[in-house]
Image (tube, rainbow, N blue to C red):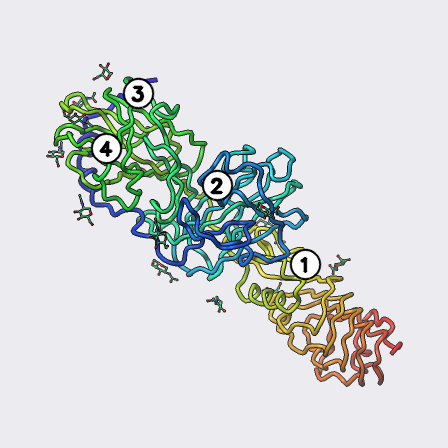
Amino acid sequence: MEKCTGVSTAWLLMAVLGVLCNVSVPRVFAENPPGSFFVNCGSTASYVDKVTNITSMPDDQFIDEKSGVNANVSSSSQYYPDFSELATLRYFPDSRAKYCYSFLVTPNTTYRIRGTFFYGNYDNQNTVPKFQMAIEGTIIASNFISEVNVIAYQEISFVPQRNVTFLCLSRDITNSVPFISAISLVKSNPEAVFAENLYRGYYYVTQFRWNFGGNGIIRHPDDIADHYWFPVKSDSSYVHSTAQVEALTATNIVNATFPPKTVMDTALTTNGTCMTIDIPFPQSYIWFMILYWSELNPNASASSRQFYVGVPGYETQFVNTSGLGENFHLSYPGRVPNYVSLFKNLSISTALGPLVNALEIFELSQNQFVTLTNEQDTLAIEEIKSSYGNLALWTGDPCLPYPHPWVTCSNVSILQSSSSIIAVNLSQYSLTGPISPSFGKLRSLTSLVLENNELNGLLPDFWQSPNLTTLNLRSNQLSGSIPPSIWDIPKLNVLDLSDNNLSGNLVPITSTSCPTSLTTVNLGNNKLSGSFPSQLLACSISTLQEMWKF
Ligand SMILES: *[C@@H]1O[C@H](CO)[C@@H](O)[C@H](O)[C@H]1NC(C)=O
Ligand SMILES: *[C@@H]1O[C@H](CO)[C@@H](O)[C@H](O)[C@H]1NC(C)=O
Ligand SMILES: *[C@@H]1O[C@H](CO)[C@@H](O)[C@H](O)[C@H]1NC(C)=O
Ligand SMILES: *[C@@H]1O[C@H](CO)[C@@H](O)[C@H](O)[C@H]1NC(C)=O
Ligand SMILES: *[C@@H]1O[C@H](CO)[C@@H](O)[C@H](O)[C@H]1NC(C)=O
Ligand SMILES: *[C@@H]1O[C@H](CO)[C@@H](O)[C@H](O)[C@H]1NC(C)=O
Ligand SMILES: *[C@@H]1O[C@H](CO)[C@@H](O)[C@H](O)[C@H]1NC(C)=O
Ligand SMILES: *[C@@H]1O[C@H](CO)[C@@H](O)[C@H](O)[C@H]1NC(C)=O
Ligand SMILES: *[C@@H]1O[C@H](CO)[C@@H](O)[C@H](O)[C@H]1NC(C)=O
Ligand SMILES: *[C@@H]1O[C@H](CO)[C@@H](O)[C@H](O)[C@H]1NC(C)=O
Ligand SMILES: *[C@@H]1O[C@H](CO)[C@@H](O)[C@H](O)[C@H]1NC(C)=O
Ligand SMILES: *[C@@H]1O[C@H](CO)[C@@H](O)[C@H](O)[C@H]1NC(C)=O
C-alpha cells in the first residue's frame, strides 16, 4: 500500500519551521553517569565481558541467598554468541508470590532499568514460563516470553520513589516458575518532555530501538548505557518502498555519542520517492517516537536530500540532512502509530531519496507508579527481617505487588496513597530470640500474632500502635513480668500471653478507666503469682481464660 501521499501545503510551512527548532534539541542522553549496575543472574563471579567490555556482576548481592537457584541454559551461545550473560539464569521454583532484587539508587533521579530473559530450555520442559515483572510495586509486564530460544527484555525509564528500588518477578495465578537472565540499571538523562512525566510518577516502556541498515545487535561499549539496538536490514518486512530499499554505510562522518556512532553510521534509503516504515505497535495509550538522521553520502550537497516525514494524524515535518556532520533527531509525541512515511516532495528537485538511521519508540504508562508502602512501616519491617534471619527471603516492598504472606496491608488498590501494615501474623515461623522492638513501630497495626515460636526475653513495653486490638504471643518462651502498660493499650481486645515463662506478681493497673475494649485475656500456663487485677475483674471482660492456672 502506498502511504506517502496527501500532504497539505499548510503543513509543509509549519514543518519547515519545525525543523529549525528541532535541530537544536539536545540529545536524549548526555553520557552514562556512574552508579550503573550490570548484573548477570545465576553467575557466581564478576567478570569482564569479552564482547561488550562490561564488568558484569553476579546477582547474589542483590537478592536473598535463599531466593532462587542457579542454572545454565542449553543453547544461548548458538543463538546469541555475543550475550555471555544469557548462558546462566536464576529461577525461582518454590511458590512465593514475588522475588525481588534490590538496588541502591539516588531518589528523584531518572533511571532506565532492564530485565533480560533467555529461557533456552534450561529445565528441559521446552515450555516458556508465564510470570510477571514488576518495578518497585508496579507490575509492568506479564507473560512476555514467547519463544524458547529468543531473547526477551522489558525496559522502562522511571524515577525511583525511595533510595532503594526493586525489580520483582511475581506470579498471579499460574504455577509457572519465574526466571531472569540479566538486569541493567543506568541513570538516564531524558529530554524535557520525558522528564516531566517521569517526575510525576509515570514511566516509559521501551518498545523499539532500531538501527536501520545495521547487522548485529549493537550494545556496550558503543552504547555506554548498553541499550540494545536491533538491526533493520534493507529486506526487512518493516520497510517498504516504491523502489528498492538500500543500506548505506559510512564511517568517520558522525561524531555521535547517542545514538552511538556505529548506529548512526548505517541507514536505509531508497532512490524512489517514498519509503514507509511499518511499526508493529499494539493498541496503546500514548507513545513517544524519536527518529534520527545523519547524511552518510559524502557526495550529498545542500540540495541533494530534502524530504518529509509523516506520521498518521500528525504534522508532516521537513528534513534537510545536507551538510550535517552530526546526527540530529526529530521527535513525535502521539497515539497508536501504524507507520512512518519518509518521502520527497517532487517539487523540490532533490537528487537523493529519503533516508533514516535510527528510531526509538517509548510508550507512556497509563497509570502512575503504585505508591510504595508507608516508609516508617517499611523500615520497621526491614528491621524485623534483620532480627530473624529466616524472614530475609521475603524481599521487596512488604505490600507490593503482592504482600508478604505474614502481613496484611491496608487497601493497596488505592493507587496514590501508600498502604500501611495493619496486621502481622508470624504464627509458626520458627522465630528465635527476643521480640523485636520494631513491631512497636508499625503505627497502624491492629493485630500482632507471634504465637508458636521460640521467642524469649522480656515482654516489650513499646506499643506505638493506637489501634492494636489483638496481641497474641502464646506458646513462646517469654519471661519476666507483665509490664503494667499493657493494660493501657487503648483498643486492646484480645490478649493472649499463655504458654510462656512469665513470672512475677500481676501488678495493679495504672489507668483509672477500665480497658473497656478487652474481651479476651488468657494468661494461663505461666509462672505468674498474685491475683488478677481487681480493676480488670470489675470491667466487663467476657472471657478470662485460665488466668488462675499460674
Ligand atoms: C574496557 O573497559 C575498561 C575499563 O572500564 C577501559 O579502560 C577500556 O578502555 C575498555 N576497552 C574497550 C575496548 O572499550
Ligand atoms: C554451569 O556451567 C558451568 C561451566 O560449565 C559449571 O561450572 C556450573 O557448575 C554449571 N552450573 C549449574 C548450576 O549447572
Ligand atoms: C526532583 O527533581 C526535579 C527535577 O530535577 C525537581 O524539579 C524537583 O524539585 C525534585 N523534587 C524533590 C522532592 O527533590
Ligand atoms: C535510605 O533512606 C532511609 C529513610 O530515609 C534512611 O534511613 C537510610 O539511611 C537511607 N539509606 C541510604 C543508603 O541512603
Ligand atoms: C532506482 O534504482 C533502480 C536500480 O538501481 C533503477 O532501476 C531505478 O530506475 C531507480 N529509480 C529512480 C527513481 O531513480
Ligand atoms: C560518490 O561519488 C563518487 C564519484 O562519482 C562515486 O564513485 C561514489 O560511489 C559516490 N558515493 C556514493 C555513496 O554514492
Ligand atoms: C538545506 O540545508 C542546506 C545546508 O544547510 C541549505 O543550504 C539549504 O538551504 C537547506 N534547504 C532548505 C529548503 O532549507
Ligand atoms: C568530531 O569530534 C572531534 C573530536 O572531538 C572534533 O575534533 C571534530 O571537529 C568533530 N567533528 C565534527 C564534524 O563535529
Ligand atoms: C510539494 O510541495 C508543494 C509546495 O512546496 C505543494 O504545492 C505540493 O502539493 C507538494 N507535493 C506533494 C506531492 O506533496
Ligand atoms: C478498597 O478499594 C476498593 C476500590 O477503591 C474499594 O472498592 C473497597 O471497598 C476498598 N476496601 C476497603 C476494605 O477499604
Ligand atoms: C495466623 O496464622 C495462623 C497460621 O496460618 C492461622 O491459623 C491463624 O488463624 C492466623 N491468625 C490470625 C489472627 O489471622
Ligand atoms: C486508627 O483507626 C482509625 C479508625 O479506623 C483511623 O482513622 C486511624 O487512621 C488509625 N490510626 C493509624 C495510626 O493507622
The image quarter in which residue 242 lies = top left
Mark 4: few, some, or many residues within 10 Å (few <14, many ≥20)?
many
Of the two numbered discs 3 and 1 in the rendering, the one whose residue sits closer to the viewer: 3
Image quadrant in which the C terminus is located? bottom right
Q: CA distance from mark 1 to mark 2?
A: 32 Å
Q: CA distance from mark 3 to mark 1?
A: 60 Å
Residue 544 in the image, given as x and y percentages of width and height:
84, 72
Of the two numbered discs 4 and 3 in the rendering, the one whose residue sits closer to the viewer: 3
Tell me the number on the disc at residue 153. Answer: 2
Tell me the number on the disc at residue 406. Answer: 1
Q: Which badge, 2 or 4, comes first in the chain's sequence?
A: 2
Left or right side of 283 for 450: right
Mark 3: few, some, or many residues within 10 Å (few <14, many ≥20)?
many
Q: Which badge, 1 or 2, comes first in the chain's sequence?
A: 2
Q: Secondary structure at mark 4?
A: strand
Residue 545 in the image, given as x and y percentages of width and height:
85, 71
Residue under label 4:
317
Image quadrant in which the N terminus is located? top left
